[in-house]
């Protein structure tokens, strides 16, 4: 069961022993570590999104995330354990990759290397999906979807475990960083997972 509340910088959604909250300035160091993790660089962020190089470059993201959550607008939340809500385990967020009036959220996540292997991604996706589509205090969206490189089997397992079945493959869809190719960017085929609000 998920729930949510807002209280300044302590806004949160809870469920599955997780606490999804707005970022705090104290999260910046671990957030930067996640963004520069080898696997996150390989699969986690499209090449056209600038990569922060210092904690100070995350200040705007911290501020913006809190504003967006308060306004029920797409943004990023920190994933923490319910019994240790201040420790950053990763991030989960949503965006509109299709026109906003369609009420379809694209979600993504990242898990800090020292928090992997504990089902954090699967549980965070479940909690966020429920809040986006079913919670009375959420935005009431019609559908949630997630895509990932076909080479990222860990994300595929997490999506299935979170209740988002695979719907197809988009060929040559996502440009991701790859230092082993001359351009530094390679387009990946991606698996698309999704679920409507009524499921």
Image: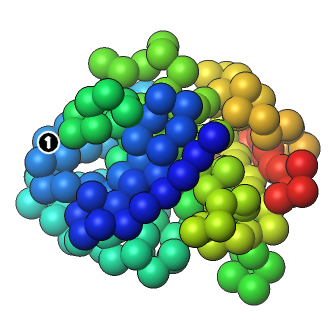
- Horizontal side, residue 92 vs residue 186: left or right: left
Q: Where residue 19 sits: x, y (%)?
A: 40, 41
Q: Could you tell me which residue is drawn at 9 percent across and 60 percent down?
A: 56
Which residue is labeled 1 in the image? 29
In this view, 180 is above or below 132: above
Q: Which quadrant is the N terminus positioned in?
A: top right
**Between 58 and 1, the one nearer to me in the picture:** 1
Q: Quadrant of residue 119?
A: top right
Question: What colour-coding does the image apply?
Answer: rainbow
> Eyeballing the image, is 102 above or below 30?
below
Corner quadrant of residue 151: top right
Q: Which residue lies furthest to the top in this view?
A: 117
- Give the residue at x 68% y 51%: 130
Q: Can residue 15 be seen in this view?
A: yes
Q: Where is residue 114 in the image (x, y as percent from the top left)?
A: 31, 18
Q: Position of residue 143 (x, y in %)?
A: 79, 62
Q: In this view, does 24 lie to the left or right of 65?
A: left
- Identify which residue, 190 or 197, lies in the foreground: 197
Q: In this view, does 172 lie to the left or right of 28?
A: right
Query: Quick check: 75 left or right of 170?
Result: left
> For the residue carrying disc 1, how many other residues have a C-alpha within 10 Å: few (<14), some (14-19), or many (20+)?
some
């Amino acid at each position: 069961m998920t729930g949510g509340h807002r209280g300044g910088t302590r806004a949160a959604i809870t469920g599955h022993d997780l606490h999804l909250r707005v970022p705090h300035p104290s999260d910046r160091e671990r957030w930067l570590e996640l963004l520069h993790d080898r696997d996150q660089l390989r699969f986690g962020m499209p090449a056209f999104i600038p990569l922060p190089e210092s904690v100070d470059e995350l200040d705007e993201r911290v501020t913006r995330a809190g504003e967006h959550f308060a306004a029920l607008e797409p943004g990023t939340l920190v994933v923490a354990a319910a019994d240790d809500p201040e420790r950053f385990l990763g991030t989960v967020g949503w965006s509109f990759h299709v026109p906003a009036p369609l009420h379809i959220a694209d979600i993504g996540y990242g898990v800090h290397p020292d928090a992997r292997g504990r089902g954090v991604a699967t549980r965070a996706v479940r909690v966020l999906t429920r809040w986006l589509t079913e919670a009375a205090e959420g935005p009431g969206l019609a559908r949630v979807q997630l895509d990932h490189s076909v080479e990222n089997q860990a994300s595929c397992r997490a999506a299935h475990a979170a209740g988002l079945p695979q719907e197809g493959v988009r060929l040559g869809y996502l440009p991701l960083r790859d230092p082993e190719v001359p351009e530094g960017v390679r387009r990946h085929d991606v698996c698309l997972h999704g679920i409507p609000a009524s499921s």
